[in-house]
Image: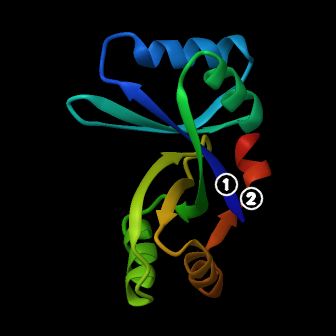
Amino acid sequence: MKVNQLSIFLENRAGRLAEVTRILSEAKVNIRALSLADTSDFGILRLIVSDFDKAKEKLKEEGFTVGRTSVVAVEVSDDPGGLHNILSMLQDAGINVEYMYAFVQQSGDSAVLIFRFDRTEQGIEILQKNNITIIPGAELYGM
């Protein structure tokens, strides 16, 4: 039920993000979802990719600091209140959302939310109890 996410530390300077995308492009690794957060000195690029191991290997070869984080991908109806419903059930269970990002699927009927919880296993249990669709990694990597 967990998804492997690459976390890449980037110096906050022109062209550094393009270096990552070049490496992944040359390795034929597809980016399925991403989030970029920055400070004045560095950024953290979070990626869901089609081939985690290959991406990690190629980026490390090029000198990037790369880590793996377990996240949870859920499908939610792309309607007002969809996100709120999920956040409310997590709040009621005392689960903290450390960060999240989202993308809309091509059909436009649903969105995919990527969550990092403080207590991942308990977060998954709450989502399952409430019949929230959790997207397995294999499915997400190939979307």
The residue type indicated by label 1 comes to Val
Quarter of the N terminus within the rendering: bottom right
Q: Which residue is mark 1?
A: 3
Q: Quadrant of residue 60?
A: top right
In this rendering, position of residue 123 left or right of residue 95:
right
Dot 1 alpha-carbon crowd within 10 angstroms: few under 14, some 14 to 19, many 20 or more: many
The residue lying at 39 percent from left, 63 percent from top is: 98
| Residue at x 39% of width, y 74% of height | 96
Point 42% across, 15% down: residue: 16
> Disc 2 residue type?
Pro
Q: Percent x, y for residue 112? A: 56, 54
How far across and down, in percent of the image, does residue 118 sit?
46, 71
Q: Kindly identify the residue that appears in the image at 76 percent across and 40 percent down.
A: 142
Is disc 2 placed on a helix, strand or loop?
Answer: loop
- 143 lies above or below 20: below
Q: Is residue 58 above or below residue 43?
A: above
Expressed as whole percent of the image width and height from the top left, the position of residue 79 reads 44, 62
Residue located beneath label 2 in the image: 136
Task: State if disc 2 and disc 1 touch (CB < 8 Å).
Answer: yes
Quadrant location, the C terminus: top right
Left or right: 28, with 79 as reference point: right
In this view, which residue lies farthest toward the left? 40
Nearer to us in this view, 136 or 98: 98
Label placed on residue 61: none
